Image (spheres, helix red, strand yellow):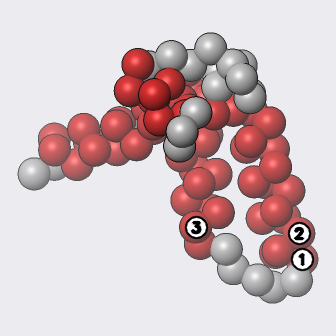
């Protein structure tokens, strides 16, 4: 968070690490866990947030762009209140 926190606050998603790579890694982890019958609910949520962030910010954005998926979910929850 020392590195990503300020990027999230500033909405600076210039890549230090590409969010598409982070998603690829999460999907590999989920695939391997699935082969062994291991549920990974937090990694599943992470992967869904990464997919949403990529849809909103693009695959070459920094991993800090995941905050946009979280914000979108928060805003959606407000709309349904």
Kindly identify which residue carries mark 1: 35
| Dot label at residue 42 | 3
Residue visible at 82% across and 74% down in the picture = 33
Q: Position of residue 25 (x, y in %)?
A: 82, 49
Q: Is residue 52 visible?
A: no
78 lies left or right of 39: left
Q: Label 1's element?
A: helix
Q: Is residue 10 visible?
A: yes
Q: Earlier in the sequence, mark 3 or mark 2?
A: 2
Q: Is residue 44 positioned above or below 16 on the image?
A: below
Residue 3 image position (x, y, % from top left): 58, 33
Mark 1 vs 3, N-terminal side: 1
Q: Nearer the viewer, residue 5 or 30?
A: 5
Q: Which residue is mark 2?
A: 32
Q: Residues within 10 Å of mark 2 (few under 14, many from 20)?
A: few
- Image-based side of 31 in relation to 79, left or right: right
Residue 1: percent from left, percent from top: 53, 43
- Element under disc 3: helix
Asked if marks 3 and 2 touch (Cβ < 8 Å), the reply is: no
Identify which residue is drawn at 55% across, 59% down.
45
- Residue at image location 67% in from the left, 74% down from the top: 40
Q: Nearer the viewer, residue 38 or 17?
A: 17
Distance between the alpha carbons at the discs numbered 1 and 3: 17 Å
Give the residue furthest to the bottom: 37
- Asked if the residue under mark 3 is in contact with the one under mark 1, i.e. CB atoms within 8 Å, the reply is no
Q: Quadrant of residue 73?
A: top left
Label 1 with label 2: CB-CB less than 8 Å: yes
Q: Which is closer to the viewer, label 1 or label 3?
A: 3
Expressed as whole percent of the image width and height from the top left, the position of residue 13 reads 56, 19
State left or right for residue 17 relative to residue 42: right
Which type of secondary structure does the marked residue at label 2 adopt?
Answer: helix
């Amino acid at each position: 968070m020392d590195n990503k926190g300020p990027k999230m606050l500033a909405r600076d998603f210039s890549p230090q690490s590409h969010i598409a790579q982070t998603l690829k890694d999460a999907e590999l982890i989920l695939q391997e866990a699935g082969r062994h019958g291991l549920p990974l609910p937090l990694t599943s949520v992470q992967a869904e947030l990464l997919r949403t962030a990529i849809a909103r910010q693009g695959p070459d954005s920094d991993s800090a762009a995941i905050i946009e998926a979280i914000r979108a979910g928060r805003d959606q929850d407000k709309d349904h209140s």
